[in-house]
Image (cartoon, helix red, strand yellow):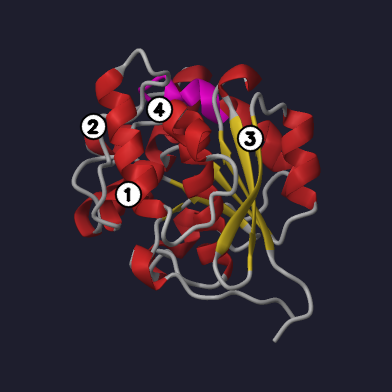
């Protein structure tokens, strides 16, 4: 048994701090929420992450390699016609396509063709502060790219229709309440169940923190051997490989 309770941080990142949430958990017998912060500034995220054993972040950590090559050639005035890539390969990273084939019912959002790209631009600044430019983005450096909707899908919970925040959206609030009720027997939510029902960003931050803990324990999706090189550059999405009802106790040396 370790003599220190493991600490993990999850961040639901948006383009602006006001829409970003940070969840801190400690994980001994089971995960326990110790803090829930919104808005979450870059400074707060970096400070809390540096105190944690691992961090999860709901944000792409890279772009599709064929997309980057296409943009680079276009910017340099060179032809892109001989790039061996399908349109799908320009929109979706290797991890996005792999996860869709093996674990989730739909594609993750595209970092190259969706507004998610704006979030990723903020994310790379945070990533560089934590592990430096050019560091491994696959999770090997202790930063795990999470996909809360994919985590919910893997656990057999509602993974769509819960995103709008505030009680004015009754349908979304009911969906979040259903999710929170399912999580409560397995995660100590402390004084925050109401906030998790009220706000989808807070809920996603919690899910991301749990993924950080599971990633640290080797219980998330890792890149297969054939994809490890590209995952180090494009990033790799981590979702749980254990059921919600079988979350293990975690310790540190």
Residue 80 among those drawn in magenta: no
For marks 4 and 3 on the same chain, the one whose residue lies earlier in the sequence: 4
Looking at the rendered image, the disc whose residue lies closer to the viewer, 1 or 2, is: 1
Looking at the rendered image, the disc whose residue lies closer to the viewer, 4 or 1, is: 1
Give whichever of 86, 41 is nearer the camera: 41
Kindly indicate the quadrant of the structure image that contains residue 168: top left
The residue depicted at 81 percent of the width and 42 percent of the height is 47
Give how far apart the Cα atoms at labels 3 and 2 are.
Answer: 24 Å
SS assignment at label 4 = loop
For marks 1 and 2 on the same chain, the one whose residue lies earlier in the sequence: 2
Give how far apart the Cα atoms at labels 4 and 1 are.
Answer: 24 Å
- The numbered mark at residue 187 is none
Give how far apart the Cα atoms at labels 4 and 2 are.
Answer: 11 Å
Give how far apart the Cα atoms at labels 1 and 3 are.
Answer: 25 Å
The answer to whether residue 236 is left or right of residue 30 is left
For marks 1 and 3 on the same chain, the one whose residue lies earlier in the sequence: 3
Give whichever of 226, 1 is nearer the camera: 1
Give the residue at mark 4.
Answer: 112
Give whichever of 57, 81 is nearer the camera: 57
SS assignment at label 1 = helix
Extent of the magenta region: 112-120
For marks 4 and 2 on the same chain, the one whose residue lies earlier in the sequence: 2
Q: Residues within 10 Å of mark 1 (few under 14, many from 20)?
A: many
Residue 115 among those drawn in magenta: yes
Give the residue at mark 2.
Answer: 87
Give the residue at mark 1.
Answer: 152
Looking at the rendered image, the disc whose residue lies closer to the viewer, 3 or 2, is: 3
The answer to whether residue 137 is left or right of residue 251 is left
Give the residue at mark 3.
Answer: 124
SS assignment at label 2 = helix
Q: Residues within 10 Å of mark 4 (few under 14, many from 20)?
A: many
Circles 1 and 3: CB distance less than 8 Å?
no
């Amino acid at each position: 048994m370790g003599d220190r309770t493991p600490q993990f941080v999850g961040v639901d990142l948006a383009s602006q701090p006001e829409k970003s949430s940070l969840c801190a958990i400690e994980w001994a017998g089971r995960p326990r929420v110790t803090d829930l912060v919104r808005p979450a500034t870059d400074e707060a995220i970096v400070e809390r992450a540096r105190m944690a054993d691992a961090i999860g972040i709901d944000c792409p950590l890279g772009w599709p390699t064929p997309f980057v090559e296409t943009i680079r050639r276009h910017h340099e005035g060179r032809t892109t016609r001989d790039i061996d890539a399908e349109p799908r390969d320009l929109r979706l990273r290797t991890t996005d396509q792999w996860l869709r084939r093996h674990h989730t019912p739909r594609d993750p959002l595209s970092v190259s063709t969706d507004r998610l790209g704006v979030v990723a631009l903020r994310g790379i600044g945070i990533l560089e502060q934590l592990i430096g430019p050019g560091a491994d983005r696959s999770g090997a450096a202790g930063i795990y790219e999470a996909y809360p909707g994919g985590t919910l899908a893997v656990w057999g919970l509602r993974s769509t229709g819960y995103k709008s925040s505030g009680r004015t959206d009754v349908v979304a609030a009911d969906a979040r309440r259903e999710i929170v009720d399912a999580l409560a027997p397995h995660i100590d939510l402390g004084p925050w169940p109401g906030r998790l029902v009220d706000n989808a960003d807070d809920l996603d931050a919690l899910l991301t923190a749990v993924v950080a803990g599971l990633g640290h324990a080797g219980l998330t999706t890792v890149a297969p051997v054939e994809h490890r090189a590209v995952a180090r550059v494009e990033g790799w999405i981590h979702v749980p490989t254990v059921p919600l009802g079988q979350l293990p106790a975690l310790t540190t040396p």
